[in-house]
Image (cartoon, helix red, strand yellow):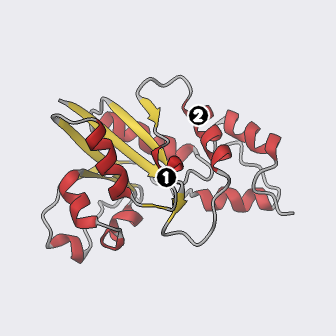
Amino acid sequence: MSRIGIFGGSFDPVHNTHLALAHAALAHLRLDELRWVPTGEPWHKASVPADAVHRLAMLKLALAGDAHFTIDEIELRRAGPSYTIETVRALQAAQPGEHTWFLVIGQDQYERFHTWHGWEELLARVTLAVANRAGVPPVAPPELQCVPHRAEVVPMPPSTLAATDIRSRLARGLPIDTLVPPAVASYIAQHALYRKH
């Protein structure tokens, strides 16, 4: 039986806190592999992410050389909004058998989980792996407290870094060298991403 983690997001851009969470989940949950799933068209975000080609290229640069990490482009190939439940159904159907599936999410996502499309079915299919980013254990929102589900806390150093902060810094011409892997910083500079025009 393998232990498989799913880590979805727009990764716009991928940054060091994403990587810290991925490594923490890998170690804490004893995963055999962690699949990064870049979002195609996020249903829950008002802003349009950077072009998928760029987000995928940055992700490949950030994960290069780590055999436990793989990138699954399933949502980038799907037309229309990306729903996690559809992705999980497809991944589990493609890999039947006795596997334990974990969905790696942040505290903020845990608090809003009941707003996700098909969230009750999703809870039945995966164990939630919730990042403990603020140093305070995450608490299930009231909507989830009455629904049986499996959740594990992934200990993380306190961090408030978000991709929006990086995009804001880039738009103002500020450095991001300590916030993203060097190869990602170089790629962003080379392609002049997230700059105001």
Image position, residue 73 (x, y; %): 50, 42
Outermost residue to the front: 79
Q: Amino acid at mark 1?
A: Arg
Q: Earlier in the sequence, mark 2 or mark 1?
A: 2
Other residues around mark 1 within 10 Å, as few (<14) / some (14–19) / many (≥20): some
Image position, residue 84 (x, y; %): 37, 57
Residue receiving disc 2: 60
Residue receiving disc 1: 78
Image position, residue 181 (x, y; %): 63, 37
Residue at figure coordinates x 36%, y 44% from the top left: 6
Image position, residue 14 (x, y; %): 58, 46
| Location of residue 16 (image quadrant) | top right
**Quadrant of image for the C terminus:** bottom right
In this rendering, does residue 157 appear at all? no
**Secondary structure under the numbered disc 2 in the rendered image:** helix
Outermost residue to the bottom: 142
Q: Is residue 102 above or below residue 166?
A: above
Q: Nearer the viewer, residue 169 or 73?
A: 73
Q: Is residue 98 left or right of residue 87?
A: left
